[in-house]
Image: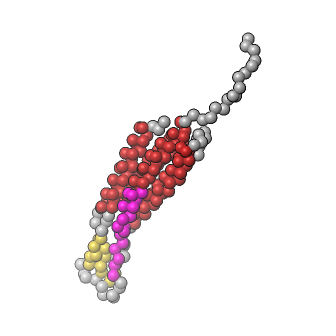
Amino acid sequence: MASKLLMITVFVLDLIAFSLAVAAEQRRSTATIQTDTEQVYTYCVYDSDISTGFGVGAFLFLMVSQVLIMVASSCFCCGKALSPGSSRGCAVLLFIICWVTFFIAEVCLLAGSVRNAYHTKYRSSLLFNDKPVSCERVRKGVFAAGAAFIFFSSIISEFYYVSYSKARGSPGPYGGEAGVGMTTYK
């Protein structure tokens, strides 16, 4: 039987991760091009860098959620074998899909956080007609894609755990002797 406490804990962690990813998308850093006081160089000025923290927080909460599910299910590969049947087949399929969606979500969150934290340091000269400054920032939708895959990973990991628990909890085939012993009792 699936542990309700574990499922609620994982759901809350995934909900926090989803909320942080959405907040990171809403608070992506923006940049403006400024000219120095002598009117010689242009450079980038970035606003708040809070979305990097939100992205890293979402990354960590999702990772803790995945670790809890995998520890509770013995990472599907450790422990005694599961009972044959549709629950085991479903658990195998959901295990694979769970890891794929988890990996994609983590890559989106990590890449978005790293890219959002990167700020261009160089300048361009107005006197020598250098190419204009490009203020690097994270593209719109990177954290949103991470949030979407957090949502998918959350649902799939919950179904995986339920399916795994059902396959683990069902009684296996009787392994004892089928006949009746005919020895004398003393």
Q: Is residue 136 magenta?
A: yes
> Residue 95: where, in percent of width, then height?
52, 50
Instruction: Kindly tell me whether residue 53 is visible in this rendering.
Output: no
Residue at image point 59% right, 40% down: 83
Which residue is the extreme one toward the left? 37
**71 or 128, nearer to the observer:** 71
Which residue is the extreme one toward the front? 179
Residue at image point 64% right, 32% down: 174
Place residue 137 in its image quadrant.
Answer: bottom left
Which residue is the extreme one toward the right? 183
Residue numbers of the magenta segment? 132-149
> Residue 112: where, in percent of width, then height?
39, 63
For residue 60, above or below residue 144: above
Q: Quadrant of the C terminus?
A: top right
Which residue is the extreme one toward the bottom? 128
**20 or 177, nearer to the observer:** 177
For residue 9, above or below residue 125: above
Residue at image point 47% right, 38% down: 2
Name the colouring of the figure.
secondary structure
Q: Is residue 159 magenta?
A: no
